[in-house]
Image: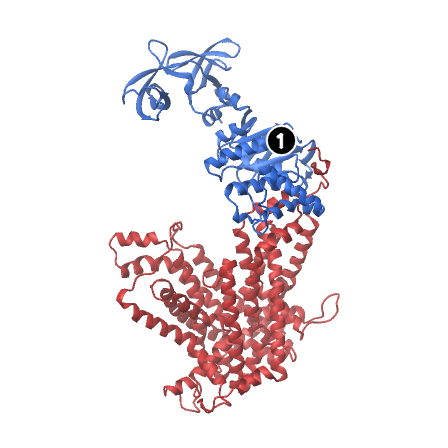
Amino acid sequence: MANLAFSPVARRRHLPLASGEALILAGLCVYALALSVLPLGRLLLEAFRPGENGLVFGTFFDVWNSRAAPRALGNTFIASLGATCISVVVGALAAGIVRLADLRGREIIAFLFLLPMLIPPQISALAWIELTGSTSPILRLVGLAPPPGRTNPLYSMPGIIWVMGLEHAPLVMLSMLSALRGIPRDLIDAARVGGARAGHILGRIVLPLALPGLMAGAALAFVSAIGNFGVPALLGIPGRVTVLTTLIYQRLNGFGPSVLPEVASLALVLVLLAVAGLVLRGLVMGRRGFSVDRTGSELEPFPTGRWRPIFELAAWMFALTIAVLPLLALVSSALVPALGVELSWATLSLENFEFVLGGSGMISRAFANSFVLAGAAALATAAVAMLLGYLVVVRRNPVARVIDRIADAPYAVPGTVLALGVIIVFLPPLPVLGFSIYGSMAIILAAYLARFLPLSLRPVIATLETLDPALDEAGRVVGAGMPRRLVGIAVPLVLPAALAGGLLVFMTAVNELTLSALLWSTGTETLGVVVFFLQYEGNSPAASALASVVVAVTITMAALLEFLARRFAPGASLLRG
Amino acid sequence: MADVTLHGISKRFTEANVLEAIDLEIASGEFVALLGPSGCGKTTLLRIIAGLERPSLGEVRIGGLLMVGANTFVPAEERRLGMVFQSYALWPHMSVADNIAFGLKVRRMRHRERAERVERAMAVVGLDGLGGRRPAQLSGGQRQRAALARCLVLEPELILLDEPLANLDAHLRLQMQAEFRRIHRETGTTFVFVTHDQVEAMALANRIAVMNRGRIEQTGSPEVLYRQPATAMVAGFFGKGVVLPAEVLSVPALGRVVASIAGSIFEFGGAAPTGPALVSLRPEHLSLVRNRPALAAVATYAWFRGEDYLVSFVLPELGGIMIELALATAPAQGERVSLGIKDGWVIPTGLSTR
């Protein structure tokens, strides 16, 4: 055993900050600073710039003394509150159907209820426009379509509220599902032994225990509604209902970067609203009210007995109406050769799909742009998530933990706000390099990298936290340095979670409109922007066709993601996470 | 074979002091157990030796080299020792052979030599032919062996074991105890292991350090700890028996004292000044007697164990302290008996009030 090679050797006698670790940490710091801290920080500074008369906070007061801004704020508030009400009712009903009743095919119903979240807002809005308009193929079938020439009823405040409410209902559903999952079966059994009937158990035990989850979901729906751009852009702009996000878009689009200080002041109020919603959510989540012993088995669905077929019928009707019907309208309005032509076997045509898939410069460019951008964002955020997650969870590095917190900010604020911040930072030429990335794909990518990192990071961190810390320590003891342990031990174990997270990023980014609407320029159109413009130009059959293709891609990827997540990375599962 | 010297090791987490001024010398080739109840700091001490944790104060030397000092901290990666974790910490995505080979790859050993060393290590722990399996396909005992092989293959001069047998069933535990003893004998490597199980500590270690609330109460061979406990905690934690309050009356010879317990006078081993003290009594020191100095006891419960009865008594004169004795015949419940005391070990109270 006298093996000199393995005697304890004190080679280095300084603090254990291996150079590899320091280098990675420095890189992550640059990522967080350039993409999160600077854009959001500069935006705040810009919003508080002295006005033309030199007063402190002058711009801010100038903007808010105008007529447009307070009216947009009021609309944002009304639309968000109204949409939240719809989300809560639909989301709670959906969660109840999926979790509390012993209906057959509940998994499929759950996936249907989730659909509105997977479909980007501008496409949901488009689908509902097609469903309720005078040319609606589905309403015409049953003779309920509004007469030709009448404005679509959705181009209004109630229309915005309805579509946004449905779009965010899955957030309430998921939040309430996780609360329901936390209720131990023993509590129900105890009540049953005590002689309580089903209605009593629901009202007195299940609902009170699920209430914090419902409230947290409602707060999240509210925050999402405040930041929503796609729905008010498609419904509010033609309907002359302006909210803050569309006001910012119209100002910046109309007047260019010179109005940055002004729109920054608008954005600041968006941030405040979003923060208020998130604080509310934090309060609700923090004070769950009850501490429940979660060691027992999970809640079982209630038997519905001979009423089951009726419940099932109602559940399916409900799910199909809110999730599938608008998509059907979307696809069928893509199948007519021109706007206004009635859909029948005789008129059915694939021209629009040929137009969208085959051809024009802008559309094929948009496909390429969106796929490249989404792919790059997915790969980069997945890689960063593994590095950052490792330093946060395994190394418990304090700097990395700060970065982890910062990483959430660009996802929590409305996308419009982030896009403005990115413009402010990247409009001037880059230091050292000397050129500006404004107007190129790079600026959109920068925004994506900031915005979607949390989607990759959460599943990676969740998986790392389930790993035995001794796995890394065992690597240390056998002499492996930090880079070696990262590559040899941590990465293989979190790769599935990182892939699932990357897939989620891809799915979200490939559809995204809010960021690119402010950042695109000729040559860098994204799919979201093109759908928006086709509809804006009045070519709604082509818009519907492109949207249908995008939805098909999204749903395929969602199914793939769910499959991957259930097998390899429980943290990334949409329904079970 | 490396010796280990710990000097003045203290560890503070935000509020609690986990370790307070630990001094411990471990000679080369020893098999030492760190024994104590959960939360006593034994695992933290082991992790400090491993370099996975940094002490707030103190020095660690391994094989004479300074590992931790005022301005020195050699991280685990560079200490070149072996460690077996309680959870075994086998990398689930690697085969058993890859698990064992990982440390050799880190050291850039050539493929042929590496394969040979892995084979040899697997043979030593009795895992021949299982190199291609994944850890998930191994039984608990085989995982333990794989973890041990992963550490033996590097031929470390010091091996640390964190509750190595805690996750095994009773039968496997005995088998692995024998394996650890054999490997210790064959390699001559210094072993330090952590356990909360005194039987396990006695079965494996030459020397045991009993820890309690961040301090070492006593270090010694199992025999010394049993016969001559230095503190009431050691007397109570290590082996069966009872600790009773006593009054030392005189010191007739070096290492002997005469003391009274509840008014009866007995002679004990150990040293203590006259005055109040404690006495550790083991079951073999006690018997039922007549007409001799004795303690009054009341039988409360007896259960038949096969070879004898285990009888519980309360000592009414000592505030109802309980004591258990194995007896050939059981007294009736509530019967008053006299307990004679043959011998015992006196513990000065000045040291035992922690």
Where residue A417 appears, as percent x and y from the top left, is 57, 69
B128 vs A38, nearest the viewer: B128
Classify 10 Å Cα crowding around label 1: few (below 14), some (14-19), many (20 and above): few
Could you tell me which residue is drawn at 51 percent across and 82 percent down? Answer: A544
Q: Relative to B320, does residue A133 appear above or below in the rendering?
A: below
Percent x, y of residue A195 = 24, 54
- Residue A455 relative to residue A292: left or right: right
Rendered location of residue A551, percent (x, y): 51, 75
Task: Tell whether A558 sits left or right of A95.
Answer: right
Q: Is residue B69 visible?
A: no
Q: Nearer the viewer, residue B235 or B154?
A: B154
**Which colour represents chain A?**
red
The amino acid at mark 1 is Glu
* Residue topped by disc 1: B186
Question: What quarter of the picture does the N terminus of chain A occupy?
Answer: top right
> Badge 1 sits on which subunit?
B
Chain B on-screen colour? blue
Q: In the image shown, does A488 or A379 lie closer to the viewer?
A: A488
**B99 shown above or below A541:** above
Residue A574: % across, % down: 48, 64
- The answer to whether one can see residue A168 in this image is yes
Furthest residue in direction left, as rendered: A195
Left-right relation of A192 to A577: left
The local secondary structure at tag 1 comes to: helix
